[in-house]
Image (cartoon, grey):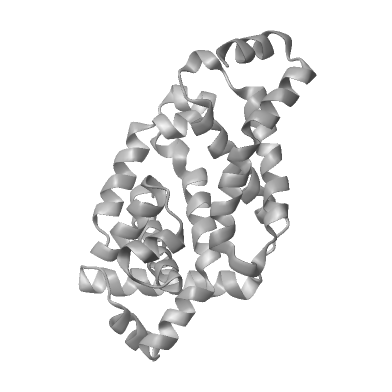
Amino acid sequence: MTNLWEAYNKTKSASIREELILKYTHLVKYVAGRLYASYGNNVEFDDLVSYGIFGLIDAIDKYDVGRGVKFETYAQLRIRGAIIDQLREIDWLPRSVRQKSRELEKAYSDLENKLGRPATDEEMAHSFGLSVEDFQKKIQNITTYSIISLDDLLEQKREIIGSEEYKQKDTPENIVESKEVKEILTDTISTLPEKEKKVVSLYYYNELTYKEIGKLLNISESRVSQLHTKAIIRMKNKLRVVFE
């Protein structure tokens, strides 16, 4: 496989690129599948795959074997980024969802700053004048936007904590390798309530699906989704403080 990459880097042959695309198409389907599980019925799986193919092609064209970064790691970032960029470009989420998401983020931030600890569902529900069940439905309604906007936050703020070399190269592998980003994310995750911490760890580090996490923790997929969304909201609020 290394010889194939070396040949492509030297020749930029269309036939070799086609071979590499076919070789790594499974990465597009994998990333699209994980995102599709989060977005529910809002988008078509085939659309996500088609957006992701552009990211794969971009990754193939820009990948440098000499950097020592695994192509699979680099490509998945490019693929995910291409899908999210396209979703953002077509502005597929209703404005009302974005407004509800900002409202929830501010409510969490205000209450948790006041309490000095993570707020419970009961406390958040009380602040909105809702039952716990209705508050959890409110969380469920903004799941997709919360996940995408965490990506946006990291994308917009990553230069603040990067080195000059990192800023100049501005490539996904530098995001992966950035010690500062990893440390900040690790510290932020460590402050989450235990169940949310488990969901984030199983989803991002063990790469399990909502369904698999639900079986492991003996909870429903919708509950996993709620826990994930709450974790993302808390992380975004903490990251904003760090990055500002």
Q: How far across and how far down the image is residue 93, in percent?
A: 65, 66
Query: Where on the picture, by quarter, is residue 39?
Result: bottom right
Q: Exactly how many numbered labels are in the figure? A: 0
Left or right, 2 with reference to 244: right
Q: Decide which of 30, 147 is in the foreground and name it.
A: 30
Q: How far across and how far down the image is residue 188, in percent?
A: 30, 52
Q: Decide which of 26, 144 is in the foreground and name it.
A: 26
Residue located farthest toward the front when viewing the structure as drawn: 215
Left or right, 125 with reference to 169: left
Q: Determine the residue positioned at 39% across, 36% down.
A: 161
Q: How far across and how far down the image is residue 56, in percent?
A: 65, 34
Q: How far across and how far down the image is residue 180, in percent?
A: 33, 36
Q: Is residue 161 depicted above or below 204 in this figure?
A: above
Q: Determine the residue positioned at 49% across, 74% down.
A: 140
Q: Is residue 129 depicted above or below 41 in this figure?
A: below
Q: Is residue 91 depicted above or below 169 in this figure?
A: below
Q: Determine the residue positioned at 33% across, 52% down.
A: 201
Q: Is residue 8 visible?
A: yes
Q: Decide which of 237, 67 is in the foreground and name it.
A: 67
Left or right, 143 with reference to 123: right
Q: Decide which of 180, 202 is in the foreground and name it.
A: 202
Q: Determine the residue positioned at 36% across, 86% down.
A: 132
Question: Quadrant location of the N terminus?
Answer: top right
Residue located farthest toward the right when viewing the structure as drawn: 14
Q: Is residue 172 visible?
A: no
Query: Where on the picture, by quarter, is residue 228?
Result: bottom left
